[in-house]
Image: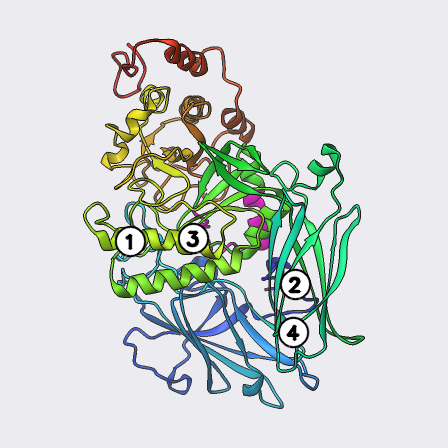
Amino acid sequence: MSDELRGYPRPLLERPHWISLNGSWDFTFDDDCRYEHPDQVPWERTIQVPFSPETPASGIADTGFHPVCWYRRAAETPELQKGQRLFLHFGAIDYDSTIWVNGHIATSHQGGYTPVTVDVTRFLREEGPQAIVVRAADDPHDLAKPRGKQEWQLEPHGIWYPRTSGIWQTVWMEVVNEMYLDSVHWVSNVERWEISFEARVCGSHHDGLTLCVKLFTDEAVLAEDTYAVVAGEVHRRIALSDPGIDDYRNELLWTPSTPTLIQAELVLRRGHTVVDQARSYTALRSLSVSGDRFLLNGRPYHLAMVLDQGYWPEGGLTAPSDAHLRRDVELAKAMGFNGVRKHQKIEDPRYLYWADTLGLLVWEEMPSAYRFTKDSVQRLTREWMEAINRDRSHPCIVAWVPFNESWGVPDLPDSPAQRHWVQSVYHLTKTIDPTRPVVGNDGWESVATDIIGIHDYDEFPERLAARYGPHALRLFQKERPAGRQLLLGQKHKGQPVMLTEFGGIAFSQDPERTWGYSRAMTAAEFAENYRKLLAVVRPAPLLSGFCYTQFADTYQESNGLLYADRTPKVPIEKIALATRGPRSNREPNWEIYWREQLMSSQRASYVVPAEDRKTGESR
């Protein structure tokens, strides 16, 4: 697979040259877990990396139970100059991976959604291709590891989908010098009009090193300065020249409508000699919550999001190409949304790059484990920290979601230990990244959160109007969407409230084998039901944002706005009009109704008229 089809795999720290190892690898399943060393493995077939063996794009398409799989590739490597190092990178391997180079164990890693990187220089042969072998162990029945939507039964059922085993993101090599930039992180401060960065330099001789940082846009150079490297690190705040006039300030601020990126050139020197150089980028934008509103750049910003699970029919969790990732961002924006909630998946960095570049807000959510044990606590916490550190410099990410619907903590109301864990992960996330809101447990049973996310699949717009209208304080007293308490052991402290899952209207050509939370039988009915739901939810006084379920059909779950191949179910302009408004004259004006209700002295909630329970329409 060519580099052009995938794009540079680590866009926040990009060097001029890299070598893709995607393509054909030798492959075998090890169902009895009998092999311990590459020399023992009988290589039975080939696989197309980076697609998991469960997917058609891999060339194998075997969705059975396979606890271990092996990969082998002979790779030509560039000739290294004195002091240079060769790094081997895997975007993600699910789940326990061991990597051999020329018969030597180079590294091991646990976690299915975060990168594996190893310096393989000392294992290289002087001549000929290098033998790379990967063993990926992924117990299909283990519910105590972060697995997201991966099925533990043989066939997908309900909201669970085929498993993802082994390598499922890009494999690549990179040559660096003896001293090199290992990581760069960016933080913007709009109030102070400055950019902070921290860089980590690796190698054995830090003396005399300097790092030159140049920040620029297409219009101008914003800053350029050189800093001493102290103990392998650089921590600096770069003050930008404040343009003063709001028009100029707004042009530089990053928003979904004006996604201005600040490009960065990083040059590491010893004296006048360049020892490493890379490109990166950042953006000026701020995030916070104030009272019951979400703020972007200090101003209230209504989130209009769609739930996106990031599956493709041919590739599973792996996009067929970089162009497919870009197209998903473009489609979300074309349907009228300003953000996505990436559900139960740590997304490929290339998707985040396109969201940064094109302007799409992203909630990043940790894939869940489904048992509460000491092992699950350690596994999820470790991998969540790795995910935050990988992605915290992406401007598009505007919220972290470590837990969803109490998955992995099923006894939250009655278990102090489970509540303490959710609280601790909330505070740990705020410690690593204090700049973003954290949604401690999205859906219900909040014990620590900056935003109260509610999941409510009521199909009747009138009932949603009653629930999220002017008397919505009942939510925290009597109402229980999905039968679950919204808050545990606390009162509502005025945080923003968002409907972060709703809708889920199914429409498919095969209704007998697919499902949704409600169903439309024609495209016209599907479009009309979506319009009615959005007309209620979009202007609801209580809500500072929403997230519709879902972006695209996902296997047996046919409640996408798009089919699985990303074909719109109704004209995309019609979807966008319903998402953004305006409302038609035939539709009840909920804003006027709510205003009248607020002026009324009656505190009783709205009573839905006698209705046909099949259609929700008044008789």
Q: Is label 1 or label 4 in front? A: 1
Question: Do callouts 3 and 2 mark residues in contact (Cβ within 8 Å)?
Answer: no
Q: Return the x and y of residue 610 as percentages of the image width and height.
A: 25, 12
Q: Which residue is mark 4?
A: 180
Residue drawn 38% across and 37% down?
559
Residue drawn 32% across and 68% down?
66
First of labels 2, 1 by sequence position: 2
Binning the other alpha carbons within 10 Å of mark 4 as few (below 14), some (14 to 19) or many (20 upward) gives: many
Residue 420: give its label. Answer: 1
Label 4 to label 2: alpha-carbon separation: 12 Å
Q: Check disc 2 and report its element: helix, strand or loop.
A: loop
Q: Which residue is mark 3?
A: 345
Label 4 to label 3: alpha-carbon separation: 31 Å
Name the image colouring.
Answer: rainbow
Residue 135: give its label. Answer: none
Q: Return the x and y of residue 325 as percentages of the image width and height.
A: 55, 50
Residue 550, image quadrant: top left
- Which residues lie in the magenta part? 309-329
First of labels 4, 2 by sequence position: 2
Label 1 to label 4: alpha-carbon separation: 40 Å
Task: Say which amino acid is labelled 4.
Answer: Tyr
Q: In this rendering, is residue 321 above or below 294?
A: below
Label 3 to label 1: alpha-carbon separation: 24 Å
Q: Which residue is mark 2?
A: 14
Task: Say which amino acid is labelled 2.
Answer: Glu
